[in-house]
Amino acid sequence: MNLSLYLLTVLIWGTTWIALKLQLGEVAIAVSIVYRFALAALILFAILLFSRRLQPVNRRGQLICLAQGLCLFCINFMCFLTASRWIPSGLIAVVFSTATLWNALNARIFFRQRVASNVLAGGAMGLLGLGFLFWPELSGHGASSETLLGLGLALLGTLCFSAGNMLSSMQQKAGLRPLTTNAWGMFYGAAILGLYCVVSGTPFDFEWNPRYVGSLLYLVVPGSVIGFTAYLTLVGRMGPERAAYCTVLFPVVALNISAWVEGYQWTMPALFGLVLVMLGNVLVFRKTKPAMVPAQAMR
């Protein structure tokens, strides 16, 4: 079951970049995000109410859902999409992939979970592999104040994503399932971002054409309803540090699709990076053997 959820998450989020590109046009980015998560929340609530699986959430749980909505469905998306104005998408992917290491650190700080050495080694290897994969894009981008601003926003988005993982893990430990917390979180995230659009005077435009509507529906159903539910379920089952290795594999899927759709050419450094990413994946999910207890200590 965990493997199926893992592969599903990687495949879905590795293809959402196509839909995100198709969203670019007359509609403001913030407004498109509002549409995405407002519709996703509506669908989730409808499913939960129809199936009678909507769990009651107390005041504390609602506050955590609010924080989760800010971190996962609002601030991080605005950070990444704004950062893409100043730094290459490959650099954003590399920064985002550090979520594996941030999740391991945060799980240690907040939940006192022991950080397995193979998870840290695998995360570092995956990060190095992404560096090789995107090296042509990274090496051709000069440093500037805008680059630093873009990096700062990408890092802030990654930290928000990691914080959202911790909050979801906390909710699941309290017995709340991701379907319920995602529904509330997406509702809060869309509401807060919608309020920001109103205050800032951003118009709520809409493009009634197959390109925009089709890409929006893909981001709503597979990208949000299915993708976030599958991923956050993994966070609860496998731990945030292992689940976050998905962030290393998303760009690999995206590059393979780009090779097929846009004619991306694989190079030797990129292939070497791909090998490192795959080896990192093996390391992250390798089960560590329990330490042997000396016979004398058992007496």
Image (cartoon, helix red, strand yellow):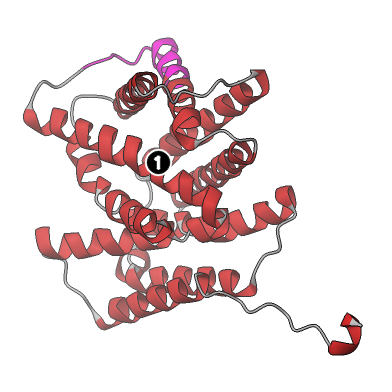
Q: Position of residue 80 (x, y in %)?
A: 41, 43
**Is 260 placed above or below 59 here?**
below
**Residue 13, above or below 220:** below
Q: Specify the quadrant that holds the N terminus.
A: bottom left
Is 3 in front, or is 199? 3
Residue at image x 23%, y 24%? 27
* Residue 292 visible (yes or no): yes
Position of 54 with respect to 201 (left or right) is right
Q: Residue 202: say if magenta.
A: yes
Residue at point 38% right, 21% down? 45
In the image, the segment drawn in magenta is: 191-205
Foreground: 291 or 216?
291
The amino acid pointed to by label 1 is Phe
**Which quarter of the image is occupied by the C terminus?**
bottom right
Inspect this view and state whether residue 262 appears: no
Which x, y percent locates residue 204? 27, 14
The stretch drawn in magenta includes residue 45: no
Where residue 280 appears, x then y in whole percent? Answer: 46, 74
Q: Which residue is mark 1?
A: 228
Q: Which residue is depicted at the point 33% across and 56% down? A: 10
| Occupied quadrant, residue 207 | top left
